[in-house]
Image (spheres, coloured by chain):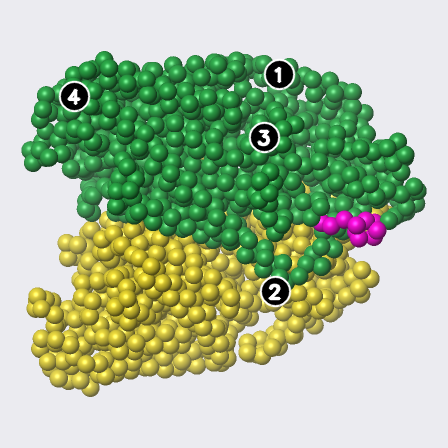
Chain colours: A green, B yellow
């Protein structure tokens, strides 16, 4: 227990989230701040120091950002209470109406964006592939390669340039960031790094929330033939659209809408972004129910029944929008975008009857998927850490890396098919085989007429078409065993080395490609034992590999069912997912969780760690505190705001206003800034809260978009004003959640997590001491922090 | 604020959950207890007194039971901490292994039970219908009616007798009870009323958890031709199976398993019962994903990602079991149970193309569904309240009511088809039409050969077959418009008057039947405008009516998709569900919520009521308190246990052990009983907790099954022992959640609900007062209680 007093007081200073840290530590903190800049250079592969590093800074790409927490607590101060009392019925209807309108808009926009994304990809990639195959038909093989690789490289460079110069956070899948945001990490600053870099330029303030880099980057990256998908970026895009809408439009273009002030709080934004993430998945896979389940299982940390209902509405809108647009395209208005535009694989296996050997084969695929999946996660993690060293050297290195990978991909895609044997076209398919001058199953490549190259049919195709080919059940022997083997290894390793380069890159499609190829391979090899269709085997392989990497169950199952439109294989799919997840969970965590950890985002787990049961809240909390009096001198407040980065300060009512010091509540930095900016001060120490209630309105204190709120530097106070007093009562949250210092840390963690808090006040157990002993923040519950203080629990982990 | 002091102290005494109520109120409480018995006679239709009625007693059927709460808080006392520290790795594996084994067993058993349920129903009902139609073929029309009505009545009487004499709680759907249990209401005593009535008979103790009455009752009721379904009872059965397994088997039959002691707590039981409920839906509809979503959306109040995963496993097992058993039956081993055994309707509408008029028709169906649904809920509520007056007069009245309804149903089913016209069989279906001597589409009834009676095809059929006929899309004009009209009204009103009689009765099937008939009716009427298939219209009608009564969205959508095996109509289904739910929500609550309220179960909503923002925790909490000292006299404890029904007592550490009185924690009644039963007392006031830690083990204090725990009457203490002291520290939960008395009631309610608490300690704000001012329980957050204390907020509702 005594270790608390010497250890925590020091630790408190090193807290960057640093809500309510140490008053005696101003100097220390300053020096800490400079040391953060120093640590930027430290590559991720190095062992980081054990204490206080995780939740201080997020490492995204090569940039390091301080992390803020979101606040899902219902703030109850006098100002807000006054607002409730005066709120009229019509305003409640406004709010409900707006909520649904926003959900509708998110669905509409995400659907339209997803559609145009696909349209562009299909047309660009289709043009590229047609050009290549036309050149090959004229036997200009080297020129074909040059055109293919050149176009790929050009597109890749565009994608990389967008990412490197405009939106570094657009790189990667985006799902880990959305996940962290929905867990309460303020990923606004992560999604919007440009706001930090170019603070002074108004024009750039909106940029981070602008999904355009993400959209165009994704189009370029997918068209460039990279082994990347568009679903992760779509989820990110959906979330960005929701965020942009929730912020009340763009202030720059005068598109703000006054009604949207209701949504200027973290809770409503969280709901909108959950809807956005669901809409993204729904749009990427045309899977509305799958989208809802994805948001529920993977993305969201808090969930309410009402949200299920709203998310469902959003994805339904997406489904309707996509359907209408695709029907519009069926009439041939969309160039090369045809039937196969948005992925939808029809696996027609009429009522698969299976027996024991089939089940054994399926179990085998599940185990294989688990093993491959955990290995994939391990390698992705290693590759990402290596890339971060390269990427942090600057945009030029980023682009160079992208070009290298692009070249490698082009070589694989164009070079490997030369090793494949030509296969004669199956009988009865003379019209379709080989495919010349259009996209399709049987690529002619270098073969004589009437033959096709099966490896080229997989490699020299868009990812969607390759998946469709693998799932096809028409021709059992369409692909050679060696072909499937080569393609599997190609996809597996290209997928690993591609993720992490500076382009928007989804993980679903590479994983489905690799999984489907080994599933079909197993199906071919076990052909004598099992009666199941090879297309079904490919689907089960894809399911098992997805389960092994992403560790989702219900949502993956539903997404795959919606993709393939066949409910009869549900039991087999469930079995495969259960096995692969169980096997993979033995080795490591899901790929998104790994990336969240690697990026240093302080993700709060839903459960408390076992060793926390041996600690109490007082053991880890930061202290001593900076507290304010109920009526405080302006100078003191300004000093505290300037010298610390704390986001919450306890307010103590003191004599003469009360008999003995008591905890009045908690006041937020952002609210203090607004209050000081209003300059309603008094000469003497007086309660004049009722005055302030008349001047200010609750919406004045609404949370601004990231990078838009008041800064302490924006305040312009005279010497005279600094000597005056201000009444903090109207803006003090008088109902903060509290725990006694002897409360078990595990139970405090559950409270903190379940209620989505930002600050948790720790009060003393025995009377006669100051009314608050510390404040717990997200950072204090991080395993790294706790185990740093108490290394003896490390073996419990 | 001052109202707190005079008002609450009195209210505290009227609290039946009464954890930590008033010490000065012993006499008052006694008299209260007797007044509960008096209130039993009060019919539900009367307006109940405004204060303190909801959470005191649950009215199930005609019985009134005191309500207990479940406790999902992690208890942390010294004994349990010692156990954690000593727990070995192997025990953790045991626990995980058991968790999955239990999930497997729940899935297996529920699947098998569902299958045999169906097998029995199909065979009994099939025999009955064949007998009737054979008699009709011989022109013995009156005899046919006598046989039909007689068999129905016999089966109905069996079902009613089972319900009336053995398991009164088996009546009704069971879903509201499961929902309330998963919200933290101790529905054990509701599910197991016999334990309360026949406490002294060991043999009966297990009865309530025994699903056999439910199973047989459901078989009889469905076979009897009632307009009831088997899904509600299946959910109840699944939950009962889970409960029985989780209790560690039956002690009576020596089937207990020592390992199962890990599951002797409310949290693990909740998880098991969630799995059971999901398994029930999965088994009833052969819809594994739908089952998971049902548990998530409708049944469960708390949800974790890990639970999703386990529930999914359980329903996957159910799906595999059902599939194997059905495949076994395909070879003809199961009598009349054929292809159509477990419902699975194949609606084959290949890629429905729809345009604007179709969408308008769909919207119209949605609105209609919402209106019909809310009216249905209103009428069901009224009918239930009327029936409760009849039912409470005794088993004879119950059975009489059942017989009346059975006769009415028989008359409708046999009588109404006489009004229908005979239709000539469609060309090309000579083999199938009319159906003679077997189940099927085209019933001959009274018609001449080559003709069929379309109303008889619906009425004189099992419910599953009737639904299949309505969904069929082969013959657009199979059913006349007048037929559909009559059938809709028949089903609508029979459904309403059947629910609430003393048989197990699901709501899904009646609602689907009525919905499908008006859907098809609309389809027929709009035939000139819309191109959609009438079978599809029937499906959309069913969806809209389900949405209008039950107000689920995602789970209904997935269940219907899994039932009909057609993903392409997903967008239309989503649209219909959204509209019908929105429309119906304007008028009233979902049917299950209504029943929960009507039964007086204290269901905690996920959100706080708006008026709670104007109150603080201290305003509603019960006081003064009975508190114990850290080392307390045995006599005092026994007296408190005997005189009150409190389930939690605060423990205060007092001088000389500490400097000033401070709150040590909370001790539970059940733990106190075990401690007193152990008789480890000391002569003097001494701390001897370490001694107790050696004697007792944490499992000694594990929660027993309902009706199995120690009672205060079981204690046998001598006069001498009553004068001795016992150290309460080892069993005191030292980390109870606390709120300050000035905490907003809304925020305290959120804390209470989110963490699933049973007791929430209210501590004083100012120093110098006793360390605890009251305890909040589930009851204190009930709107009825709060609005009873503060009627001025009533208009806010």
* Location of mark 2 (residue): B55
Q: Are marks 2 and 3 on the same chain?
A: no
Q: Residue B81 vs residue B12: left or right?
A: left
Residue at x 64% of width, y 21% of height: A51
Q: Secondary structure at mark 4?
A: helix
Distance between mark 3 and mark 1 Cα atoms: 27 Å
Q: Is residue A20 visible?
A: yes
Q: Position of residue B736 (x, y in %)?
A: 68, 45
Verify whether residue A690 appears in magenta: yes
Residue at x 83% of width, y 43% of height: A680
Q: Secondary structure at mark 2?
A: loop
Above or below B542: residue A76: above
Distance between mark 1 and mark 4 Cα atoms: 56 Å
- For residue B451, which quarter of the picture? bottom left
Q: Chain of mark 2?
A: B
Verify whether residue B744 appears in magenta: no
Classed neighbour count for the residue bearing mark 1: other residues with Cα under 10 Å, few (<14), some (14–19), many (≥20): few
Above or below B502: residue B235: above
Dot placed on the residue nearer the N-terminal end, 1 or 4? 1
Q: Chain of mark 4?
A: A
Dot placed on the residue nearer the N-terminal end, 3 or 4? 4
* Location of mark 1 (residue): A39
Identify the magenta region: A689-698
* Location of mark 4 (residue): A137
* Location of mark 3 (residue): A204
Residue nearest the observer in this picture, A169 or B30 = A169
Q: Are marks 3 and 1 on the same chain?
A: yes
* Foreground: disc 4 or disc 2: 4
Distance between mark 2 and mark 3 Cα atoms: 57 Å
Q: Main secondary structure of the magenta part?
A: helix
């Amino acid at each position: 227990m005594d270790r608390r007093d010497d250890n925590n007081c020091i630790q408190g200073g090193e807290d960057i989230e640093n809500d309510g840290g140490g008053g005696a530590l101003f100097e220390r903190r300053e020096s800490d701040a400079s040391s953060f800049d120093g640590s930027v250079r430290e590559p991720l592969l190095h062992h980081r120091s054990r204490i206080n590093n995780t939740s201080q800074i997020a490492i995204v790409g090569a940039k390091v950002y301080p992390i803020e927490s979101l606040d899902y607590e219902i703030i109850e101060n006098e100002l807000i209470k006054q607002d409730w009392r005066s709120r009229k019925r019509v305003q409640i209807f406004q709010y409900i109406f707006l909520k649904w309108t926003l959900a509708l808009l998110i669905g509409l926009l995400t659907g339209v964006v997803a559609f145009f994304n696909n349209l562009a990809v299909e047309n660009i990639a289709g043009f590229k592939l047609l050009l290549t195959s036309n050149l090959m038909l004229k036997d200009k093989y080297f020129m074909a390669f040059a055109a293919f690789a050149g176009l790929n490289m050009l597109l890749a460079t565009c994608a990389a340039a967008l990412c490197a110069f405009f939106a570094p956070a657009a790189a990667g899948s985006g799902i880990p960031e959305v996940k962290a945001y929905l867990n309460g990490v303020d990923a606004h600053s992560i999604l919007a790094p440009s706001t930090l870099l170019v603070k002074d330029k108004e024009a750039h303030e909106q940029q981070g929330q602008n999904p355009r880099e993400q959209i165009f980057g994704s189009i370029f990256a997918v068209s460039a033939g990279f082994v990347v998908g568009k679903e992760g970026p779509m989820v990110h895009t959906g979330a960005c659209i929701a965020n942009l809408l929730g912020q009340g439009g763009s202030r720059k273009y005068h598109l703000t809408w006054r009604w949207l002030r209701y949504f200027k709080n973290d809770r409503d934004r969280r709901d909108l972004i959950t809807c956005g993430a669901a809409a993204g998945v729904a749009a990427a896979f045309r899977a509305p129910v799958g989208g809802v389940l994805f948001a529920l299982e993977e993305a969201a940390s808090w969930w309410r029944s009402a949200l299920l209902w709203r998310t469902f509405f959003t994805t339904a809108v997406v489904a309707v929008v996509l359907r209408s647009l695709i029907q519009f395209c069926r009439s041939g208005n969309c160039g090369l975008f045809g039937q196969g535009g948005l992925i939808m694989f029809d696996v027609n296996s009429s009522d698969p009857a299976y027996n024991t050997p089939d089940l054994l084969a399926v179990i085998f695929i599940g185990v294989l998927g688990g093993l491959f999946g955990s290995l994939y996660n391990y390698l992705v993690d290693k590759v990402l850490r290596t890339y971060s060293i390269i990427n942090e050297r600057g945009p030029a290195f980023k682009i160079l890396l992208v070009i290298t990978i692009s070249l490698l991909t082009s070589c694989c895609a164009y070079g490997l098919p030369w090793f494949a044997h030509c296969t004669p076209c199956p009988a009865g398919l003379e019209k379709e085989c080989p495919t010349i001058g259009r996209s399709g199953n049987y690529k002619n490549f270098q073969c004589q007429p009437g033959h096709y190259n099966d490896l080229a049919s997989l490699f020299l195709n868009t990812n969607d078409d390759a998946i469709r080919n693998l799932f096809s059940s028409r021709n059992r022997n369409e692909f050679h065993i060696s072909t499937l083997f080569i393609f599997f290894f190609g996809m597996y390793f290209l997928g690993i080395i591609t993720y992490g380069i500076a382009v928007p890159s989804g993980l679903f499609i590479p994983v489905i490609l690799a999984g489907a190829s080994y599933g079909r391979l197993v199906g071919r090899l076990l052909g004598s034992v099992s009666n199941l269709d090879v297309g079904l085997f490919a689907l089960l392989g894809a399911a098992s590999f997805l389960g092994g990497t992403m560790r989702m169950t219900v949502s993956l199952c539903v997404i795959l069912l919606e993709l393939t439109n066949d409910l009869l294989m549900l039991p087999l799919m469930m079995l495969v997912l259960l096995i692969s997840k169980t096997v993979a969970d033995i080795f490591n965590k899901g790929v998104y969780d790994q990336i969240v950890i690697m990026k240093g985002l302080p993700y709060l787990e839903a459960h408390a760690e076992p060793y926390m049961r041996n600690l109490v809240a007082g053991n880890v909390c930061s202290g001593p505190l900076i507290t304010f009096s109920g009526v405080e001198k302006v100078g003191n407040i300004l000093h505290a705001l300037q010298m610390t980065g704390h986001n919450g300060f306890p307010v103590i009512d003191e004599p003469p206003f009360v008999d003995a010091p008591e905890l009045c509540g908690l006041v937020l930095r952002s609210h203090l800034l607004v209050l000081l900016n209003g300059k309603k001060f008094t000469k003497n120490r007086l309660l004049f809260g009722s005055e302030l209630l008349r001047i200010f309105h609750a919406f004045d204190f609404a949370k601004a978009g990231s990078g838009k709120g008041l800064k302490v530097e924006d305040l312009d106070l005279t010497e005279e004003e600094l000597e005056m007093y201000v009444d903090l009562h109207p803006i003090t949250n008088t109902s903060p959640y509290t725990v006694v210092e002897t409360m078990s840390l595990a139970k405090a963690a559950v409270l903190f997590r379940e209620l989505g808090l930002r600050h948790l006040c720790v009060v003393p157990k025995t009377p006669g001491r100051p009314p608050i002993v510390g404040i717990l923040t997200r950072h204090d519950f991080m395993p790294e922090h706790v185990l740093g203080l108490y290394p003896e629990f490390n073996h419990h982990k």
